[in-house]
Amino acid sequence: MVNCPRCGTPNPDQTADCLACKASLGGQRFAQALDAARPPPPPPPPSALRPPAQPADLTPLTAAPAPIVGLPPLTALGAASGQAEVQSFLEQARRRSRRRRLTAAAVSVLLVTAGAVYLGFSARSERQRQAAALFLKDFGDVESGPLASFWRCTVRARQSDVHRASDNLVVMEALTRAFNADPEHQPTDLERKCLPLLALAEARLGALAPPTAFVQPVDALELQLGAVRRAFVRYIERLTALREQTAREQALLAAARVFHGGARTDPSATAAGYVHALRCAIPALPKMAQQVRQPPDTQALVEHIYNTCKDEPRFAARLRDDCASALADAQPDRLVTLVQRRMSGDDRDVSALEDCFRRAGREAFGEALDAVGKSWVDYRNAIKGVFSRIVEFGGKAAAGS
């Protein structure tokens, strides 16, 4: 029988609704099934079932019987107890279902967010690559434009890629040759023609808007261009001081070429002046000429110039500063006649003098030329630093860098 939880009316076991009040009996049947499924409580120990000893004076028969010690109190399995358990079970089921829904919703949100982040990142990366490509194109125009023109201007070579030379020695030797070729105008041309090209390159570089990845190397390049400018200002000052010295060197070399038949303007006077200048710097010149067996032969003179220029740093300066004035002595004396007869026509001494003056010139340029060479190395490293950032966007570093 199933007792109705509302009115307490007994109903048959299979009845769905109470016969008296029509209340649903499903929960009550479930509660009674739970009660029936509980195992019975364990029996009390035998000592608990033993009745206590009776005192000498017996309790009157009319007294109420004493309760049995050791047995648990009887608790009625009513409808309220079963209904509470049913409600607890259903509440736990609802909580589990709510947790599953919340978990599924959180996973969905994470997936959607991850997809949106991926798509956004891909779009942003593509925009960054496009911006990097545009910037490198503009930067390449500056590097191959005014910057390249500046370096070509410094060495007086319009078609030479001196801005991409293999090392700074190439640049330093080209600068020395450019000055020796035109010492009168090279300092002025560097100041009035070349440095404005460097200023143009600096202005165009400053007008660019580099992406974030290129900001640091571009800033480093701008600083280095300033160092290049300062190095050339000092170099120009040094060239100006050397201009008169180089003019005397060129006069000596021109006289040497005339002596060997390289020019036809007043050859006797010019040749005589060259012989007197050589005698001033090389007292053993008459003996060298006398020992020539098969003219023309300047072998002894060439060896003397090479060795003395190497061993005595002041030899080139003495020949240039002290003995160049002897070029004005045009007296065709016996020494001039002897040296012309024995040595004129073998112009290897001209190359020996050029090498001697070149070596002395590198020392004369001193720290000014060294500073230019160092600034070129730092400039090339700064250029490569800009182009190397392209690898961050999946490309190959441009060497041209």
Image (tube, grey):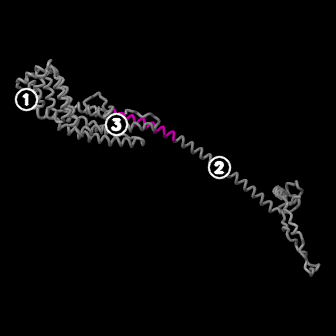
Residue bounds of the magenta highlight: 121-145
First reached walking from the N terminus: tag 3 or tag 2: 2
Tell me if mark 2 has few (under 14), some (14-19) or many (20+) residues whose alpha carbon lies within 10 angstroms of its own: few
Residue for badge 2:
103
124 vs 21, nearest the viewer: 124
Residue for badge 1:
328
Which amino acid lies under the numbered mark 3 shown in the image of this protein? Arg
- Residue 343 shows up from this direction: no
> Residue 94 sits in which quadrant?
bottom right
54 vs 4, nearest the viewer: 54
On whether residue 132 falls in the magenta region, the answer is: yes
Residue that protrudes farthest toward the top in the picture: 294
Which amino acid lies under the numbered mark 2 shown in the image of this protein? Thr
Q: Depth-wise, is mark 2 or mark 1 nearer the camera?
A: 1
- Residue 380 on image: x %, y %: 34, 36
Residue for badge 3:
380
The C terminus - image quarter: top left
First reached walking from the N terminus: tag 3 or tag 1: 1
Q: Depth-wise, is mark 3 or mark 1 nearer the camera?
A: 1
Which amino acid lies under the numbered mark 1 shown in the image of this protein? Ala
Are the residues tagged 3 and 2 within 8 Å (C-beta)?
Answer: no
First reached walking from the N terminus: tag 2 or tag 1: 2
* Gap in angstroms between the C-alphas marked 3 and 2: 58 Å
The correct choice, above or below, for 308 with respect to 341 in the image is: below
Which residue is drawn at the image coordinates 39% and 43% (left, top)?
Answer: 216
Magenta span: predominant SS is helix
* Gap in angstroms between the C-alphas marked 2 and 1: 106 Å
- Residue 323 shows up from this direction: yes
Tell me if mark 3 has few (under 14), some (14-19) or many (20+) residues whose alpha carbon lies within 10 angstroms of its own: some
368 vs 308, nearest the viewer: 308
